[in-house]
Image: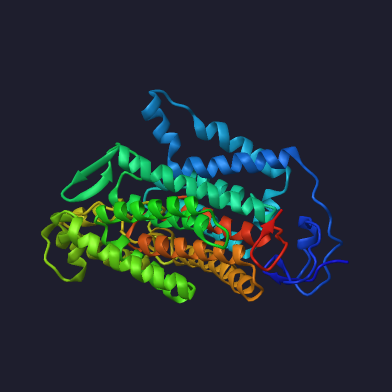
Amino acid sequence: MLSRHWRVGSVRLAQPGAPPGPVESAAALSSPVGQSAAQPLVVAYNPVRQAAFLFGLGFLFVELTVLHELAPIMLGFNTYLLYLIVPPALFCGLLTGSVQRTFRNRASWYWLAFYAWMILATPFSTWQGGSFARVVDSRISLMMLIVVGGLATTWKEVRGIFYTIAGAAVVNLLTARLFMKTDEGRLSVGLTGFDIANSNDLAAQLLLVLPFALYLALGPGRNILVRLGVTATLGYGVWIILQTASRGALVAMGAMFLIFILLGSARQRIIVIAAGGLIAIATLALLPGQTLARLGSLFGEHYEEADESEASRMYLFQKSLLYTVQHPIFGVGPDQFSNFEGGTAVASGQIGSWHATHCAWTQVSSECGIPAMIFYIAGVVSAIRVVVRMRRAARDHGHTDIANACFCYLLGMTGFLVAITFLANAYRYYVPAMIGLAVTMATAEPQVSSPSGKVGS
């Protein structure tokens, strides 16, 4: 007798109390909502698909840890990690249907439309060569979407992705500790050319990955040592973020606090409120004076460097809005805001800033046009909606593990999206990776054995 299911996007959750059935094939899940699903099939072991999964995890881990840049620094020679991992991940994934799985959700199509619009905007760029280079560099984001979007076929594999991101969070913290550099009260990674060397970039990445470490501690039956380890990791992570003195990250942490209050259980709300109070006390007591002064400027306190930074960012933001209005279809060209702003200012007898706009959303609109911004935002919103619906259905039917995973995803996405509102990194792999993760969560095949939260493959 087959178990009864509810469908959430492309995910079907077994009704609590119903006898568990076998793991279902991807073909069974592809039937439209409301139609009878195909006869469930037991998924046979496929070594090529297993290789695709492992190489895909490696791709995600290497990118998040920036290991392809860190390894040559530590070892003294180029390891070519991405060349060793990405081609096998793509090849094995293509052979086992990763593209089909990725594009079964409209969120992936929205991001693909954004990338296509970048390509369309390049011939109209104010510097075609520079825009073409940006489009070529962004191929890693397209690869990430395809690999992560088609990575998991079972909920056990989804957990593997969460564990991988949690592991990357630990490596990020170790990297920050080993290569710590403090300048004018701001912590950064003292490695030239390192992707997350900048204080703001480091803080934004930690805001994204740390909630995946939290997932390891949530749910009944978690090992006490694991919970203590996660608590220590999260505490140190918050401390590192505060030491970056990133005001955008501080705003993002406030947004994550609100998500905890709105979506967390009563017990979680009590814990996070108590933790927030302890963090506030520790911040005031232990952070260096310069760091506190910079963060305090967010609340009206005077700090010269922060005030100058705010004035510069406001100027760039206003220019990005102006260029969006002046070039609404294709923008000034992918990655060309700083060149266009500086050149225009010099041509009019002024001194240009020659910096990127510190807002990912207007970075897209001013450089690629309003249609690109619409596709970009639509992809993000669509992915979040998928996870919100999954979480609601999982909670309604007692599937704690799925609900916790969705909660941690939403927590990380909230912090990151708020943080990049003050950063110019719209073209990096983070957004397509998170869109891909939402898609693979929605298309994975959960086998729920009981309403207590045990989910197996």
Seen from the viewer's position, the closer of residues 359 and 319 is 359
Q: Which part of the image, by quadrant, shows the N terminus?
A: bottom right
Q: Is residue 349 left or right of residue 266?
A: left
Q: Is residue 184 left or right of residue 110?
A: left
Residue placed at 38% from the left, 52% from the top? Answer: 232
What colour scheme does the image use? Answer: rainbow
Q: Which residue appears farthest toward the front when viewing the image? A: 224
Residue at screen point 59% across, 59% down: 108
- In this picture, residue 258 sits left or right of residue 138: left
Residue 437 position in % (x across, y down): 57, 56
To which quarter of the image does residue 5 belong?
Answer: bottom right
Choose top left, top right, bottom left or bottom right for residue 248. bottom left
- For the residue pair 128 and 99, the one nearer the viewer reads as 99
In the rendered image of this protein, does residue 166 appear above or below residue 361? above
Task: Tell me residue 394's x, y (percent).
Answer: 63, 70
Q: Is residue 365 left or right of residue 93?
A: left
Residue at 65% from the left image edge and 66% from the top image edge: 452
Q: Is residue 433 visible?
A: yes
Residue at 40% over, 68% down: 271
> Visible in this render: residue 124?
no
| Residue 14 pos. (x, y %) | 74, 68
Query: Foreground residue, 214 or 29?
Result: 214
Counting from the top left corner in percent of width and height, residue 197 is at 31, 43
Total marks drawn?
0
